[in-house]
Image: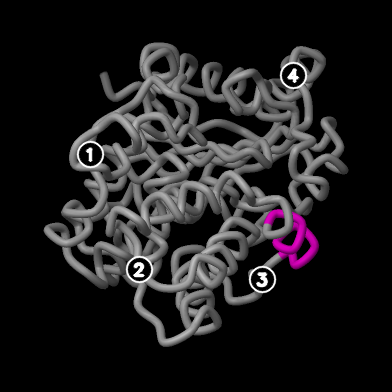
């Protein structure tokens, strides 16, 4: 069937899901994110042939937050190789919240269960090569520029500062992992990189294009150049299926059925082989930390276009 959708359809679907914003709340534990407007809803589908359709607040910038975990994982795998990365971080899903410390204390060896929870993501960011935090952030940002095909993308410094100042639980995770040899170096420097990584700001079309590169087996859509090795892009997409939606990943696989990663900014990036990248944003979150309207939009897209990989 035709897997394409029109901008008019997307706009109609946004109007349909708008009432769902009342069922969630904008996160307030990061002060800068508490300022977000729950009505700032947008959706974009970036097809592999380069055609992009979008609707809603298409020029509104939002931060990647946990979506950046997929990008950092691809970069760490390219820098260090699979064996090293997975000697420090596991491959298994978890039913615990994304910020939980419990499994670090009870599992043996004491390493994070997967790269999509905070502990695992911090360990992954720690593996990115660079002489200084500035080098590592620059490398991450250059990689995002490559994936999005846009070198204007930058960091929301207000969000980064706000996250760094309130990152006490992430500090606890880091010190626990440092005690157990999972991470090395300065915890404060790692948190500097990690909070800036999470604070990379994009619009809905840029995020959909990043998703399209993953959908395209890591190849650039225009040049066909292999930005991410094919097998590493597949590893990233597998984690998106099993762990990408926090501890709602199982129900999301049933309801939507595409590789996807959410962030507490209310954004979700999805990718569908042979179709392209999908991005949605709606700052109002459910109790699991996923966008309420984003989940509804993706469920509608998946159902109408038959996108589920299962």
Distance from disc 4 to disc 3, alpha carbons, whole Å, reads 28 Å
Q: Residue at x 37, y 47 (%)?
A: 120
Q: Identify the disc placed on residue 144.
A: none
Q: Earlier in the sequence, mark 4 or mark 2?
A: 4
Eye-nearest disc, 3 or 1? 1
Spot occupied by residue 214 in the image (x, y as percentages of width and height)? 35, 51
Q: How is the image coloured?
A: one colour
In this figure, which residue is indicated by the disc labeled 3? Answer: 154
Q: Which residue is mark 4?
A: 24
* 267 relative to 14 in the view: left or right: left
In the image, what residue occupies the spot 38% across and 20% down?
95
Give the residue at mark 2.
184
- Would residue 250 be found to the left or right of residue 90 on screen? right
Q: Nearer the viewer, mark 1 or mark 4?
A: 1
- Identify which residue, 273 or 180, lies in the foreground: 180
Front residue (pair 47, 209): 209
| Alpha carbon separation for disc pair 3 and 1 | 30 Å
Q: Judge depth for marks 4 and 3 and give the one in front.
A: 4
Pick whichever of labels 1 and 4 is earlier in the sequence.
4
Going from N to C along the chain, the mark reached first, 3 or 1, is: 1
Q: Position of residue 152 (x, y in %)?
A: 65, 74
What residue appears at the point 57 percent right and 71 percent down from the top-left corner?
150
Q: Which mark is residue 91?
A: 1
Q: Are marks 4 and 3 in contact (CB under 8 Å)?
A: no
- Of labels 2 and 3, earlier in sequence is 3
The answer to which of marks 4 and 3 sits earlier in the sequence is 4
State whether residue 271 appears in this view: yes
Q: Earlier in the sequence, mark 1 or mark 2?
A: 1
Give the extent of the magenta segment.
Answer: 156-163
């Amino acid at each position: 069937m035709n897997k394409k959708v029109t901008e008019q359809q997307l706009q109609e679907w946004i109007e349909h899901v708008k009432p769902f914003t009342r069922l969630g709340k904008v996160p307030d534990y990061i002060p800068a994110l508490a300022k977000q407007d729950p009505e700032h809803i947008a959706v974009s589908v970036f097809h592999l042939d380069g055609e992009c359709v979008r609707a809603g607040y298409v020029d509104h910038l939002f931060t990647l937050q946990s979506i950046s975990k997929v990008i950092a994982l691809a970069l760490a795998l390219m820098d260090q190789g699979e064996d090293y990365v997975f000697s420090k971080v596991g491959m298994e899903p978890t039913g615990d919240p994304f910020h939980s410390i419990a499994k670090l204390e009870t599992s043996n060896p004491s390493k994070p269960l997967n790269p999509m929870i905070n502990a695992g993501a911090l360990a992954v960011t720690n593996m990115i090569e660079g002489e200084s935090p500035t080098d590592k952030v620059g490398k991450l940002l250059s990689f995002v520029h490559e994936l999005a095909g846009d070198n204007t993308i930058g960091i929301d410094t207000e969000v980064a500062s706000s996250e760094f100042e309130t990152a006490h639980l992430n500090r606890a995770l880091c010190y626990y992992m440092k005690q157990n040899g999972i991470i090395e170096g300065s915890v404060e420097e790692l948190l500097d990189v990690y909070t800036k990584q999470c604070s990379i700001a994009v619009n809905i079309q840029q995020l959909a294009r990043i998703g399209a590169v993953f959908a395209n087996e890591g190849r650039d859509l225009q040049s066909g150049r292999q930005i991410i090795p094919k097998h590493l892009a597949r590893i990233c997409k597998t984690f998106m299926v099993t762990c990408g939606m926090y501890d709602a990943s199982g129900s999301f696989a049933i309801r939507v059925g595409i590789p996807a990663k959410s962030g507490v900014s209310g954004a979700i990036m999805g990718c569908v082989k042979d179709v392209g990248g999908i991005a949605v944003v709606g700052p109002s979150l459910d109790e699991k930390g996923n966008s309420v309207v984003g989940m509804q939009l993706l469920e509608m897209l998946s159902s109408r276009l038959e996108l589920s990989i299962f």
